[in-house]
Image: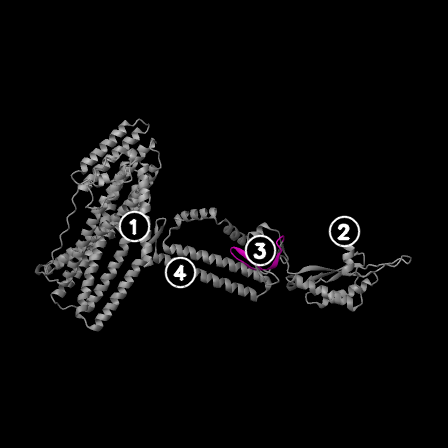
């Protein structure tokens, strides 16, 4: 109840608001209120008689000016339009502005629109198409004629629907343009010189829209007639399939037609074979003969396919006649023939789509030929004529395929009617699977888009994805196996394995990509289009990706960084072991087992320390101090012994023995450094290894009572100075002191 009341309230408020807007517009245009009232009360028949509407003035167009034209009946329409145009023409010739020529053009267009609108308005409606008379019986010839009529009517219905959609779009665009012009017109002052020009534009545009409205009205009626006629034809076709009979003359005629069709097919095969036997290489130097050869070959291929469909249709008609005459039929042979016919028709249907695209491509290419000499002009005319004939024959071929498929389905229905339940079930299953496969093939072979002149079908695209995914799968496992072999072997060979693995990965992916594109049918001679698109993409947003990719390749080939190296990026605090060198970035694992992803380009632009570039070992220095009163030789012995006991120290390598250096005299003792060569494993753990050595040095010094100096300070008191007085301070004393301080201030 509340919802209904709220809706009524909203509608009433919207009506009052609309009325106020119209009254304000009328007042702005100096229109009398009775005209607005008459326009608002457009519907009632019991209303008071309407006053005569004045001829619209382009300088003072009301929002409802179109009613002057719309309310005219058929008898007064032409006179009203003539009066309207005479007023417009008079005002145009009275204009003295610089845009007089433009106004005359608009006036001429308005007159043409008025004449066309009057013709459409007074044009009688199209008569309703007569229904197809139903017959008690139909022969095969009549059935085929019905099939042709159904096909033609379907095309007409599709064309009508397409035209209706186009007219709807035009009306919407015209309405939007009219609203824009009206808004601009209302914003102008009454004395603005542009107002007359703007009013003429509104009048011209409104007649355009009225013409579209009339055309839409006629087209809707035609479309309705076509749809009704199509429904009647479909009903007649169903009736014909149920009431077929044999005509006495058809049996004899069908055999003659089959014999004639075989002769035509033989002639078409002979012509096509002769054309295919010609050496195309002899035409490579002459573009005229090459074009004529290619188009003639296509024309003969279509003619040969037409002859095939004609023969298949006649052979199927003979089976239908045999069913109608109740002759003995070998059903196994019939079923094999039907399957063969279907396969042939499916193949021809796919070829017809390909031929249609090729014929259209040739037409565009031939239109671009320059007619610089009589030979080229003559060849161009011949080629264009052949293209037109080929197009017509392809359309006939597709129509023949549809008719023949319908007849084959009719034959299958007759077969099912005389077979047993099991046979019918098996045949239906085979037919359904065949139909599903046929529909799937049609969908898969449907062109999705074009790359250059090469159409890419759904099947081709699926093939491309399969090849690329397979290549990626192979590349992934090859890369993984090689890296696993490198990890099992010597650590020095791991970078070599990794380099081979990454290059193999990229190479297999690249081969898969090109193989997939070749499987789609892309001609790599025209690969410049793809290269150009790639260059544009690089210019707009892929610089960083390409820079990192190229940097990664440089790192792999230059081998300044290898998998397993311990590196340090200066200025960023990043330090760790290189785990992977990928397409975009390198993965570094620090000693806290945190993976750091660094873009490859950073290694090209930043200073980097590679601790294990040329050899996996490294010398480290660990400083320490002892007091001046200890024996230096004892210090060296105990510290070297402690270093030898640690597993991080490199042993058994000449020139790589640890040593203790006296490097200076400090304020509190000697300054020493333990200089030690670390094992490859210890190099990659600098913090933990450094802590281990410092711990060992401290233990060695303490165990041998070697003093480690520490800074010391002494406090001395004078003997003759009076003792310091100490006083306990409580909260009361602190308050008294603060009070005394305030009074002092």
Mark sitting earlier along the chain (3/2) = 3
Q: How many discs appear?
A: 4
Q: Colour scheme of this structure image?
A: one colour
User: Nearer the viewer's eye, disc 2 or disc 4?
Assistant: 2
* Viewer-nearest of discs 1 and 2: 2
Q: Is residue 262 visible?
A: no
Q: Which mark is residue 466?
A: 4
Cα–Cα span, label 3 and label 2 = 79 Å
Disc 3/disc 4 C-alpha distance (Å): 35 Å
Residue 602, image x and y in percent? 57, 52
Q: Which mark is residue 742?
A: 2
| Residue 585 on the magenta span | yes
Query: From what the image shows, is residue 194 above or below residue 420?
Result: above
**Highlighted range, magenta:** 570-588
Pointer 1 or 3: first along the chain = 1
Q: Of label 1 and label 2, which has the lower sequence position? A: 1
Q: Residue at x 22, y 61 (%)?
A: 341
Residue that protrudes farthest toward the right in the picture: 720
Which secondary structure, mark 4?
A: helix
Q: Which mark is residue 559?
A: 3
Q: Which quadrant holds the N terminus? A: bottom left
Where is residue 272? Give x, y as percent. 24, 52
**Residue that numbered label 1 is attached to:** 357
């Amino acid at each position: 109840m509340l919802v209904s009341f709220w809706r009524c309230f909203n509608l009433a408020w919207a009506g009052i608001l609309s009325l106020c807007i119209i009254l304000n517009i009328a007042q702005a245009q100096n229109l009398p209120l009775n005209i607005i009232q008459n326009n608002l009360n457009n519907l009632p028949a019991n209303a008071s008689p309407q006053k005569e509407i004045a001829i619209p003035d382009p300088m003072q167009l009301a929002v409802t000016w179109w009613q002057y034209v719309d309310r005219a009946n058929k008898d007064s329409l032409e006179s009203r339009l003539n009066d309207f145009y005479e007023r417009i023409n008079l005002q145009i010739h009275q204009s003295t502005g610089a845009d007089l020529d433009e106004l005359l053009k608009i006036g001429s267009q308005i007159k043409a629109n008025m004449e066309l609108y009057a013709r459409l308005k007074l044009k009688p409606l199209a008569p309703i198409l007569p229904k197809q008379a139903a017959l008690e019986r139909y022969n095969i010839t009549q059935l085929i004629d019905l099939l042709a009529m159904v096909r033609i009517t379907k095309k007409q219905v599709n064309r009508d629907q397409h035209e209706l959609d186009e007219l709807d779009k035009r009306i919407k665009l015209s309405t939007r343009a009219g609203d824009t012009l009206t808004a601009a017109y209302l914003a102008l002052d009454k004395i603005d010189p542009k107002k007359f020009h703007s009013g003429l534009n509104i009048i011209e545009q409104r007649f355009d829209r009225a013409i579209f409205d009339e055309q839409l009205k006629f087209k809707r009626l035609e479309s309705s007639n076509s749809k009704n006629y199509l429904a009647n034809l479909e009903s007649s076709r169903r009736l014909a399939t149920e009431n077929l009979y044999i005509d006495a003359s058809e049996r004899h005629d069908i055999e003659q037609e089959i014999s004639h069709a075989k002769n035509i097919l033989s002639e078409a095969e002979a012509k096509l074979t002769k054309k295919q036997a010609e050496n195309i290489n002899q035409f490579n130097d002459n573009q005229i003969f090459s074009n004529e050869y290619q188009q003639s070959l296509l024309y003969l291929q279509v003619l040969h396919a037409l002859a095939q469909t004609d023969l298949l249709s006649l052979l199927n008609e003979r089976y239908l006649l045999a069913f109608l005459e109740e002759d003995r039929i070998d059903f196994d042979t019939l079923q094999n023939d039907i399957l063969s016919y279907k396969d042939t028709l499916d193949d021809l249907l796919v070829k017809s789509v390909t031929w249609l695209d090729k014929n259209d491509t040739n037409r565009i290419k031939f239109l671009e030929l320059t007619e610089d000499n009589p030979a080229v002009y003559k060849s161009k005319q011949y080629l264009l004529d052949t293209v037109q004939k080929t197009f017509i024959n392809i359309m006939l071929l597709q129509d023949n395929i549809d008719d023949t498929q319908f007849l084959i389905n009719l034959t299958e229905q007759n077969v099912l009617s005389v077979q047993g339940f099991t046979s019918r079930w098996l045949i239906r299953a085979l037919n359904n699977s065949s139909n599903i496969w046929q529909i799937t093939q049609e969908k898969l072979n449907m062109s999705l888009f074009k790359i250059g002149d090469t159409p890419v079908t759904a099947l081709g695209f699926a093939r491309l994805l399969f090849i690329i995914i397979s290549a990626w799968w192979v590349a992934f496992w090859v890369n993984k196996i090689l890296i696993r072999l490198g990890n099992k072997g010597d650590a020095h060979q791991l970078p070599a394995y990794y380099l081979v693995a990454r290059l193999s990965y990229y190479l297999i992916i690249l081969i898969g990509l090109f193989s997939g594109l070749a499987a789609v049918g892309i001609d790599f001679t025209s690969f410049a289009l793809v290269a150009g698109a790639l260059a544009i993409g690089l210019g707009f947003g892929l610089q960083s990706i390409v820079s990192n990719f190229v940097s990664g390749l440089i790192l792999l080939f230059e081998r300044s960084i290898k998998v397993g190296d311990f590196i340090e990026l200066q200025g960023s605090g990043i330090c760790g072991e290189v785990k992977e060198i990928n397409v975009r970035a390198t993965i570094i694992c620090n000693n806290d087992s945190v993976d750091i992803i660094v873009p490859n380009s950073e290694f090209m632009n930043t200073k980097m320390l590679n601790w294990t570039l040329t050899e996996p070992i490294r010398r480290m220095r660990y400083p320490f101090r002892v007091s001046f009163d200890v024996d230096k030789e004892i210090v060296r012995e105990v510290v070297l012994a402690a270093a030898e006991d640690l597993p991080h120290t490199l042993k058994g390598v000449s020139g790589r023995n640890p040593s203790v250096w006296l490097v200076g005299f400090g304020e509190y003792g000697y300054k020493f450094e333990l200089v030690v060569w670390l094992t490859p494993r210890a190099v990659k753990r600098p913090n933990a290894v450094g802590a281990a050595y410092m711990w060992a040095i401290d233990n060695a010094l303490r165990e041998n009572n070697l003093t480690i100096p520490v800074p010391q300070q002494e406090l001395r008191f004078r003997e003759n100075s009076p003792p310091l007085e100490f006083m306990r301070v409580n909260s009361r004393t602190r308050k008294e002191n603060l009070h005394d301080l305030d009074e002092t201030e």
